[in-house]
Image (cartoon, rainbow, N blue to C red):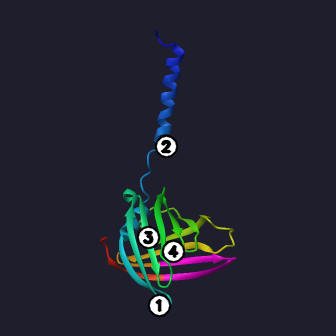
Amino acid sequence: MKPPKIFVLYTVVVALLSVPLLAQYTPAKPAIGFDQLKSLVGEWEGKSASGQPVHIIYQLVSGGTALMERLRPANEPEMMTMYTADGNRVAATHYCSTNTQPLMRSEPISGPAKEFSFFFVSSTNLASPETGHMDHLLLQLADANHLSQQWTWKEKGKTKVEVFHLTRTTDVL
């Protein structure tokens, strides 16, 4: 038995309309900024502005689609930040020792950058916007072996900044 002509026509139309929809689901090429941040892989040592030691390990995970940062400031629990490509931006989710998980996003990046400025977008486990949370992160790449981080904490409308100056100790993990 031959299928009715309307069924064949319907099948062809649905197939042709599906092609553009499938193209939307191909993974985007990683952001140029994310590719640049991959160069941070390795171990870093440094000090806070007050002279306290800090240790950071950067590692590529999830098949190279995420950069994991393990941050160990002196006298504080280890914290983790995951950096991922987000179109022409970079997203950073910070897993804070205060049990919040702020999501921050960079401005669009179109070429090599010396600074990456991440702005607060949202957070999980945040009771209210007035509750203390990481609100901004500025990464400054002086050269291949020197990095500064400036973390901004926001609570009840007031901000506190902590700065770390770091030097690469190894680029192999």
Q: Residue flagged by tag 1: what amino acid is it?
A: Gly
Is residue 155 covered in magenta?
Answer: yes
What label does residue 69 carry, if any? 3
User: From the viewer's perspective, is 21 left or right of 147?
Assistant: right
**Which residue is labeled 1 in the image?**
51
**Which residue is labeled 4 in the image?**
138
Q: Is residue 51 above or below residue 103?
A: below
The secondary structure type at the circle numbered 2 is loop
**Which residue is labeled 2 in the image?**
24
Q: Is residue 6 above or below residue 159?
A: above
Name the one closer to the observer, 10 or 44: 44
Give the foreground label among 3 and 2: 3
Along the polypeptide, which appears first: circle 4 or circle 1? 1
Where, quadrant-wise, is the C terminus in this rendering?
A: bottom left
Q: Residue flagged by tag 2: what amino acid is it?
A: Gln
The secondary structure type at the circle numbered 4 is strand
Identify the residue at horizontal 50%, vertical 88% (top origin).
49
Along the polypeptide, which appears first: circle 4 or circle 2? 2
For the residue carrying disc 2, how many other residues have a C-alpha within 10 Å: few (<14), some (14-19), or many (20+)?
few
User: From the viewer's perspective, is 90 left or right of 124?
Assistant: left
Distance from disc 4 to disc 2, alpha carbons, whole Å, reads: 32 Å
Along the polypeptide, which appears first: circle 2 or circle 1? 2
Give coordinates of residue 100: x percent, y percent: 59, 69
Residue 53: quadrant of the picture: bottom left
Q: Residue furthest bottom?
A: 51
Which segment is the magenta one? 149-163
Give coordinates of residue 6: x percent, y percent: 54, 16
Along the polypeptide, which appears first: circle 3 or circle 2? 2
Along the polypeptide, which appears first: circle 1 or circle 3? 1
Give the foreground label among 3 and 4: 3
Identify the residue at horizontal 44%, vertical 49% (top origin).
27
